[in-house]
Image (spheres, rainbow, N blue to C red):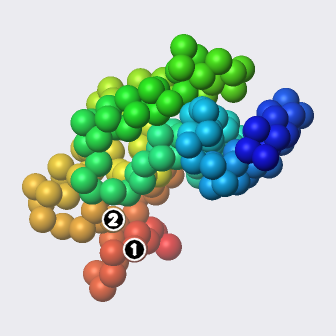
């Protein structure tokens, strides 16, 4: 039964129905978790499903979701990203899993790892996707002891100043 589900999942993957392929592989894993390569196939189908469906605010593939990480986790470190990467690579490497889905999954996992372990590309990715403010904004707010929203100057609002009773920006000429 498990082998039939995995064959059907492969057909769905070939047709481009990644969610259905992942669901079928997950069902096969629940039925027989000790079946040959079922964990590996499930992980590879999950990566393709995430790449296809999980988009961030900008509409790009969510690199944190590919690795199965929460971008808002305060305990997320480079070591955590590296260990998650190693676990996924051991599951989906083409030498371990001889399937066409493994090659694509490994490529996406490697792209996510390369981006998120390099500090400068990670900061650029996080700022572009609205996950955090640029470092210079945080430093400025920390040095002055004021709220970060007071320090952010929006494009086209350079003449504006904060209102006395709130942190919202208003134009002095309005």
User: Tag on residue 149?
Assistant: 2
Q: Quadrant of residue 163?
A: bottom left
Residue 131 spot, x, y in % from top left? 42, 52
Give the mark nearer the N terminus: 1 vs 2. Answer: 2
Q: Residue at x 63, y 55 (%)?
A: 30
Residue 129 spot, x, y in % from top left? 50, 46
Q: Does dot 1 land on a helix, a strand or a loop?
A: loop
Residue 115 spot, x, y in % from top left? 42, 28
Q: Does dot 2 land on a helix, a strand or a loop?
A: helix
Q: Quadrant of residue 108?
A: top right
Using the image, determine if residue 160 lies above or below residue 87.
below
In the image, is 132 to the left or to the right of 112? left
Q: Residue at x 46, y 33 (%)?
A: 88
> In this rendering, does residue 115 appear at all?
no
Nearer-the-camera pick, 120 or 93: 93
Q: Are marks 1 and 2 in contact (CB under 8 Å)?
A: yes
Nearer-the-camera pick, 118 or 11: 11
Within 10 angstroms of label 1, few (less than 14), some, or many (20 or more) residues? few
In the picture of the structure, the residue carrying the numbered disc 1 is 168
Within 10 angstroms of label 2, few (less than 14), some, or many (20 or more) residues? few
């Amino acid at each position: 039964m498990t082998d039939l589900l995995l064959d059907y999942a492969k057909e769905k993957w070939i047709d481009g129905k990644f969610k259905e392929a992942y669901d079928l592989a997950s069902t096969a894993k629940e039925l027989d978790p000790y079946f040959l390569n079922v964990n590996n196939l499930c992980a590879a189908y999950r990566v393709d499903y995430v790449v296809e469906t999980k988009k961030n605010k900008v509409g790009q593939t969510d690199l944190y979701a590919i690795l199965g990480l929460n971008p808002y986790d305060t305990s997320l470190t480079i070591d955590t990203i590296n260990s998650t990467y190693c676990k996924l690579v051991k599951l989906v490497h083409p030498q371990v899993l001889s399937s066409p889905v493994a090659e694509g999954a490994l490529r996406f996992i490697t792209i996510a790892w390369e981006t998120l372990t390099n500090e400068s590309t990670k900061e650029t990715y996080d700022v572009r996707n609205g996950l955090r403010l640029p470092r210079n904004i945080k430093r400025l707010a920390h040095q002055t002891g004021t709220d970060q929203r007071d320090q952010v100057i929006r494009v086209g609002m350079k003449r504006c100043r904060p209102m006395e009773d709130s942190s919202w920006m208003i134009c002095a000429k309005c």
